[in-house]
Amino acid sequence: MQAITLEAVKRETGKSAARRLKNQGYVPAIMYGKDMTENIPLAVEYTKLQKLLQKYGRNVLLNVVVNGTTHTALIKEIQEDTLKGKIIHVDFQRVSMYEEIEATVPLRFEGIGLIESKGGIVQHQLWELTVESLPDKIPQEIVVDLSHLEIGDTLFVKDIPVPEGVKVLDDPEEIVVSILVPKEAGEEEEEEGEGTAEG
């Protein structure tokens, strides 16, 4: 994974400073992590951050440039305004390219349409995996092909292939998806009738 450059500036702390940054089109951030004696309060341009996330996702490896100094980092956490859907704060974690770290990687499922065309229902149990690897080996997402599954099948964590150099930390026996048989209309009516009789 090639590191993407993101410009940032040091910021003042406090509510008035935060409002001023917001009015100027910046979002507050903080950097902490490897070999840092103290956290660095930062600010990044909102539009640039948003475009970066849309293009590369949250697991992108970054070169965060602060006053001419480059820090290799990952996005550790993003806080959002749930009502407006806007980013209000970002945590950057500085990392070493030679030390493995943990990360959460989203799963992207393919082949759902084929299963549904056979009459199956895909029941999701897990949408992401926790992995450990060197920073430049962390995948932005893991593609899970479901097209080979049949009705009644179950896919476990251990069944998901991951890139070389990536170790999955989740329980290998944890269920990711199950392919269920849809209920027949007659069965549903029968269950409803039983429920009414019991009442």
Image (cartoon, rainbow, N blue to C red):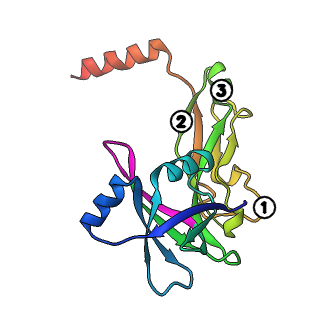
Tell me the CA gap for discs 2 and 1.
28 Å
Foreground disc of the pair 2, 1: 1
Tell me the CA gap for discs 2 and 3.
11 Å
**Residue 176 left/right relative to 196:** right
Whether pointer 2 and pointer 3 mark residues with C-beta atoms closer than 8 Å, the reply is no
Q: Measured along the vertical axis of the image, is residue 173 above or below residue 151? A: below
Task: Say whether disc 3 or disc 1 marks the residue closer to the N-terminus.
Answer: 3
Secondary element at tag 1: loop
The residue that appears at 25% across and 64% down in the rendered structure is 16
In the image shown, does 27 or 153 lie closer to the viewer? Answer: 27
Residue indicated by mark 1: 164
Q: Where is residue 134 in the image (x, y as percent from the top left)?
A: 69, 70
**Residue 84 left/right relative to 161:** left
Q: Measured along the vertical axis of the image, is residue 179 above or below residue 103? A: above
Magenta stretch? 74-87
Whether pointer 2 and pointer 1 mark residues with C-beta atoms closer than 8 Å, the reply is no
Q: Position of residue 61 (x, y in %)?
A: 64, 62
The residue that appears at 52% across and 78% down in the rendered structure is 33
Q: Which amino acid does label 3 sit on?
A: Ile
- Residue 58 got which mark? none
The residue that appears at 56% across and 85% down in the rendered structure is 35
- Residue 115 got which mark? 3
Residue 96 part of the magenta-drawn span: no
Residue indicated by mark 2: 123
Q: Which amino acid does label 2 sit on?
A: Gln
Q: Where is residue 21 in the image (x, y as percent from the top left)?
A: 35, 59
In the image shown, does 111 or 2 lie closer to the viewer? Answer: 2
Secondary element at tag 3: helix
> In the displayed image of the protein, which residue is found farthest to the left?
199
